Image (cartoon, helix red, strand yellow):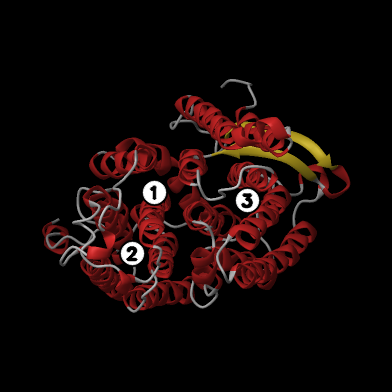
């Protein structure tokens, strides 16, 4: 394995870009967008180069590992590394950031310091997102986990819609509450852990037998923070406000990438470090996940705001992801990890194409549309494909991940899987009803002369549509990277897949 510091380099590139963009001289201020996009593309190239060197068959849990002492008195290290799950999430983030920067080209119309700050904040956010997925030291993870709040708060509060301050403060308060609860768990973990100079390393904390009550309380602390971030019912209410008031590109990074930190943390920390507590809490979490699936879908059906509808669909989708994680089967966990990636691309397409329509119509209200497939047929077509991905149409990316989650869940929790399947029917309702209300019908006279998708907008959606098709028809390369990490995690928990119940098994046993 190369000794080149891949993860540090990938994280530093957008941070350097943010500094360059933020301190551009006035004569170059109008180049902020191009420079930000350039740095994000360089980060993407380095990410792809690192991914090509990843060895899915390695016996090591983490690859591209780096470790340097940081706060030695408390055993804190700058320690980074990735397994297959972390790698695919970093690749997803690296793809979505340039897509969002290109989509945000005209979000801040006045060039100058305000525009520079906007694009610099998005690059800083990319650095923190890469850091949080790459961290293999629990304290370092917590630092990145909390640091992400800063750029998001300013992106929503300074550049969002009419109720941006309310949405930003609500997002911050919920996230800080979750983070403070996790901090208590982190401190308790240090006290109960091995101590010494490696006291916070994930691999050193794995396999430790904690006192039962202490382990369960620490698990609850981590899980609560991740449930807020995910978001799960009933701590989800910050998401619709934040996603609706934020700029569309910010909403994509918030829902498509940042929220995955919650579900990723459940796999990396809850299952791996607290296996006994994870199995103890599983029945309650399965119930919460099913409620999230159905609740999010039902509320999505009743929305008249496009952005709010898409936000509620994500509550439902995250319910599926958590359900697969805590089914604790190979199919369910692998499906959840793949679902995180697929949801990122699907949500990005829905938010960004909806934003194209809103920019042309000047309204977020679904009843203000109707007949727009006759006005902007290309946008309508991409919107339909994105919607089909969201409802998990076979042949598109979300189908295989949702199928794996339901199969994996059915192996242990048949009733939960059956109830979650209702979420698929509800998804068809909220997507098809939204499309019907917005796109079908007579051509509106007021929309005459409205331009269809521009060349820049086509470049925005092209990689997303490509991801739909590639991951829909050939997800094997991604699953080959994910599966070893899934198997290792389930070994830490100490669970194996239930034996298949074939009709002939009993008869064969009787004959023998």
| CB-based contact (under 8 Å), mark 1 and mark 2 | no
Identify the element where label 1 is drawn.
Answer: helix
Q: Above or below — where is 399 with respect to 460?
A: below
**77 vs 494: above or below:** above
In which image quadrant can residue 283 be found?
Answer: bottom left
Q: Nearer the viewer, residue 333 or 46?
A: 46
Looking at the image, is mark 1 or mark 2 earlier in the sequence? Answer: 1
The mark that comes first in sequence, 2 or 3, is 3
Marks 1 and 3, the one that precedes in the sequence: 3
User: Mark 1 highlights which residue?
Assistant: 345
Visible residue check, residue 391 = no
Q: Which residue is mark 3?
A: 206
Looking at the picture, how far across and down is residue 457, in whole percent? 37, 42
What residue is disc 2 on?
Answer: 409
- Residue at image point 41% right, 67% down: 319
User: Residue 263, position in %: x, y?
Assistant: 51, 58
User: Could you say which is closer to the camera, residue 503 or residue 324?
Assistant: 324
Q: Which mark is residue 92?
A: none
* Above or below for 299 versus 83: below
Which quadrant would the C terminus be assigned to in this image? bottom left
Find the distance from the CA under tag 2 to the CA under tag 3: 25 Å
Q: Is residue 304 left or right of residue 279?
A: left
Task: Name the spot of residue 312 as percent of width and height, x first.
Answer: 41, 70
Residue 58 percent location from the top left of the image: 48, 30
Q: Secondary structure at mark 3?
A: loop
């Amino acid at each position: 394995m190369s000794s080149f510091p891949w993860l540090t380099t990938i994280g530093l590139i957008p941070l350097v870009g943010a500094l360059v963009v933020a301190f551009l001289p006035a004569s170059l201020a109008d180049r902020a967008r191009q420079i930000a996009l350039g740095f994000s593309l360089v980060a993407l190239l380095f990410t792809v180069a690192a991914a090509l060197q990843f060895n899915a068959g390695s016996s090591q849990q983490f690859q591209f590992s780096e470790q340097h002492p940081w706060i030695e008195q408390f055993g804190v290290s700058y320690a980074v590394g990735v397994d297959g799950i972390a790698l695919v999430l970093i690749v997803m983030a690296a793809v979505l950031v340039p897509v969002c920067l290109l989509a945000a080209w005209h979000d801040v119309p006045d060039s100058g310091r305000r525009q520079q700050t906007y694009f610099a904040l998005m690059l800083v956010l990319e650095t923190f997102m890469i850091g949080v997925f790459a961290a293999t030291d629990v304290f370092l993870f917590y630092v990145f986990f909390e640091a992400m709040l800063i750029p998001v708060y300013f992106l929503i509060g300074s550049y969002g819609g009419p109720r941006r301050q309310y949405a930003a403060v609500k997002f911050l308060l919920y996230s800080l509450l979750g983070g403070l609860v996790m901090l208590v768990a982190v401190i308790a973990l240090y006290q109960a852990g091995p101590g010494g100079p490696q006291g916070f390393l994930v691999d050193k904390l794995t396999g430790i037998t904690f006192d039962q009550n202490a382990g369960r309380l620490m698990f609850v602390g981590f899980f609560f923070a991740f449930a807020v971030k995910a978001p799960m019912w009933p701590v989800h209410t910050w998401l619709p406000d934040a996603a609706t008031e934020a700029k569309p590109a910010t909403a994509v990074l918030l829902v498509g990438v940042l929220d995955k930190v919650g579900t990723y943390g459940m796999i990396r920390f809850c299952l791996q470090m607290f296996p006994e507590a994870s199995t103890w809490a599983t029945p309650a979490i399965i119930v919460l996940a099913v409620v999230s699936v159905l609740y999010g879908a039902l509320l999505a059906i009743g929305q008249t705001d496009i952005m709010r509808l898409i936000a509620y669909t994500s509550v439902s989708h995250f319910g599926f992801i958590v359900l697969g994680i805590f089914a604790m089967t190979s199919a369910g966990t692998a499906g959840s990890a793949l679902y995180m990636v697929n949801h990122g691309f699907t949500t990005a397409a829905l938010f960004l194409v909806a934003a194209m329509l809103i920019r042309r119509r000047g309204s977020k209200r679904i009843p203000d549309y109707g007949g727009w497939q006759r006005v902007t047929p290309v946008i309508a077509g991409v919107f339909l494909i994105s919607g089909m991905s969201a409802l998990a149409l076979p042949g598109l990316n979300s189908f295989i991940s949702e199928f794996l989650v339901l199969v994996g869940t059915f192996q242990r929790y048949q009733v939960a899987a059956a109830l979650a399947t209702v979420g698929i029917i509800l998804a068809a309702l909220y997507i098809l009803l939204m499309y019907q209300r917005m796109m079908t019908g007579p051509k509106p006279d007021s929309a005459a002369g409205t331009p269809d998708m521009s060349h820049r907008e086509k470049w925005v959606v092209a990689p997303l549509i490509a991801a739909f098709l590639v991951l829909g028809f050939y997800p094997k390369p991604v699953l080959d990277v994910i599966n070893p990490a899934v198997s290792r995690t389930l070994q830490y928990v100490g669970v194996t897949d239930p034996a298949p119940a074939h009709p002939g098994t009993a008869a064969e046993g009787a004959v023998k």
